Image (spheres, rainbow, N blue to C red):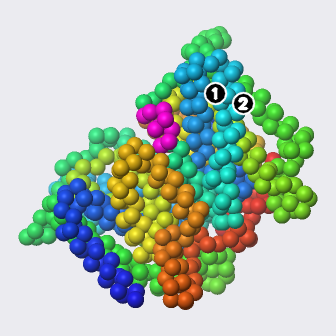
Amino acid sequence: MDWTTIFQLIISGLAMGAIYALVALGFVLIYNAVGIVNFAQGEFIMVPAFFGITALVTWHLPFPLAYLLVLVGMAIFGLVFELIAYYPLRHRSFLPVVISTIGASILLKNTSQLIWGAIPLRFPGLFEAQTLNVSGVRIGFQHLLILAVTLILIGLQYLLFEKTLLGKKMQATAQDKQTARLMGIPINQMIAITFIYSALLGGVAALLVAPIVNVTKDMGSLIALKAFSSSIVGGFGSIPGAILGGLFVGVIEALAGSYVSSAYTDAVAFVILIAVLLVRPQGIFGERISEKA
Amino acid sequence: MKVVLILLFLALAVAAPIVVVSDYWHNLMVLAVVYAIATLGLNFTLGLTGQLSLAQAAFWGIGAYTSALITVRYEVPFWIGLPAAAAVAALFGVMLGFPSFKLSGHYLAMTTIGFGIIVRLVLQNWQELTGGADGIGGIPAPSLGVLDVDNNFKYYYFALAFLLILALVAYKIQHSRAGRAFQAIRENEMAAEATGVNTNRYKLIAFLFSALYGGIAGSLYAHSAGYISPDTFSFDQSVVFMVMLVLGGSGSIPGTLIGATLLTFLPEWLRFLKSSYMAVYGAGVMFMMIFFPTGLWGLLEMIYGKLTRRPVEVLSPLEKTEEATAAKSPVETRKSS
């Protein structure tokens, strides 16, 4: 237990936690808007990672252009996803929609495998394996980048929701669809925008995390499940809850993976989840209990 | 009419392995029966009680490993392995039932997913107990005294007998006081509680039966395959069970059986699509949900109702409208930031 190692673990845990937080935000925004947990959220990371591989490796595009293309691609993807997997089912209860998103997830994973193959691919990063040395503590540039971008994104999102008319319309739609409609807000458009925004968050998360993991058709599944548990740990439906929950799970996971058992790293998020649900179902930072009997 | 249909299905089930003479297809038929039993189990929680459980593959795995471990390590016969598998799985089922007192919907789903992932990680990493990623081999075939059930053809009829008994039991439960209590919880938990249904107790019972069926299916699977490894009992398999249930017809026993059988064979029928068959499968699931949310059985009932000009009331959790759900859980009124 020396402090340098612990510090390094906390930084890498925070970085992974930031990814969980971004994906958890994607979950929460869609959930708030339509009351549905999107089980294909993991594919919102997997698809842009493959888009990025095509742009960077196959087409040899420079980073800024490739990143831009991936994000544009994700905006279109989010819209198409909403039109196919959600829109036709918008008047149904949550189970058919959940299953429809599971179907979408199977479809996306296997289509990706058809296009990009089954072999894990390496995603070129901005800074290979460079690290920053701060008095003995080695911090990966990629980890710093993840943290910086996530922080900026959260700030921008705050401005979007609190300071712009579009953000207010989206919030109104999430709070009460009927009333929002009466106020003249085109709620179907707002829901579509929410899906697009959620896909964009996935796109950013993918560009950040893909260089430090292998890109496969299953890369998103576990990240999404952990992100979802993070959002519940933080307090489901709450935006600060999703962010703090993600960071919390990321750090605990990194520490437990190193000090408790590396084989059970992937179980950590769910152990935390089950413990939190049993003791405090509304989540650590939760404001209100929903779906509670 | 109903009796005729059941006899027809039964005749089809009995004749199938005689008509199709191929060990490969016999193996698939055994698998279809095993899946049908596991899916019948899921029908108790998800179909009847409306508790979204995504841990059925974990119960299936617990059953398979329990049965395999005690028959291989202690050389006890299948007839001890099977009840042990059912009992251990049921125990875990009750354990997982407790969170359902406090949680429902997505929260419960997530808890069950977490449980499934932890079970799979334990199977994978507890080398001393489970053999780790290598799995367990040499699981003995069951014996019926004079007859060893040692090939897929015999095993199919062996497993089919279990399926018929378990389907009958499930039918009896569904039409008993407990079955009505399950459905009351699904339709409206508060109203059920107000009319004197002990909702917590019945939720536990639903989870118990769900896991019990899963455990029996697991044991039957292990002794048919002869070899098991952790990969089989993944979260994806739980999803497959759920899709089987919902595509067949959630809440209905014939629907469950149709769904399980169809989805076991569907990948085979889609083989001509080569590597793209899983993509088509995913698209098919979406298509079904968009156009036939009550599943195949609901569709058949509707067609039957139209033919006989008798309106059939399809009671399924999938039929509820947005308003009904909104009234039940205040998800629409949540604050977003």
- Residue B21 shows up from this direction: yes
Name the residue rendered at 85%, 44% in the picture. Answer: A167
Nearest the eye: B46 or B32 = B32
User: Badge 2 is on which residue?
Assistant: A150
When the figure is inspected, residue A33 is found, relative to residue A19, above or below; the finding is: below
The image position of residue A74, as x and y in percent, is 66, 37
| Residue B286 sits inside the magenta stretch | no
| Residue A114 sits inside the magenta stretch | yes
Callout 2: helix, strand or loop?
Answer: helix
Crowd tier of the residue under label 1, counting other residues whose Cα lies within 10 Å: few below 14, some 14–19, many 20 or above: many
Mark 2 residue type = Thr
Residue range (magenta): A110-118
In this rendering, position of residue B215 left or right of residue B255: left
- Residue B70 shows up from this direction: no
Name the residue rendered at 90%, 41% in the picture. Answer: A164
Mark 1 residue type = Leu
The answer to which image quadrant residue A124 occupies is top right
When the figure is inspected, residue A26 is found, relative to residue B189, above or below; the finding is: above
Is the N terminus of chain B in the top left, top right, bottom left or bottom right quadrant? Answer: bottom left
Give the chain of mark 1.
Answer: A
In the rendered structure, which disc, 2 or 1, sits on the residue that comes first in sequence? 2
The answer to which image quadrant residue A159 occupies is top right
User: Badge 1 is on which residue?
Assistant: A208
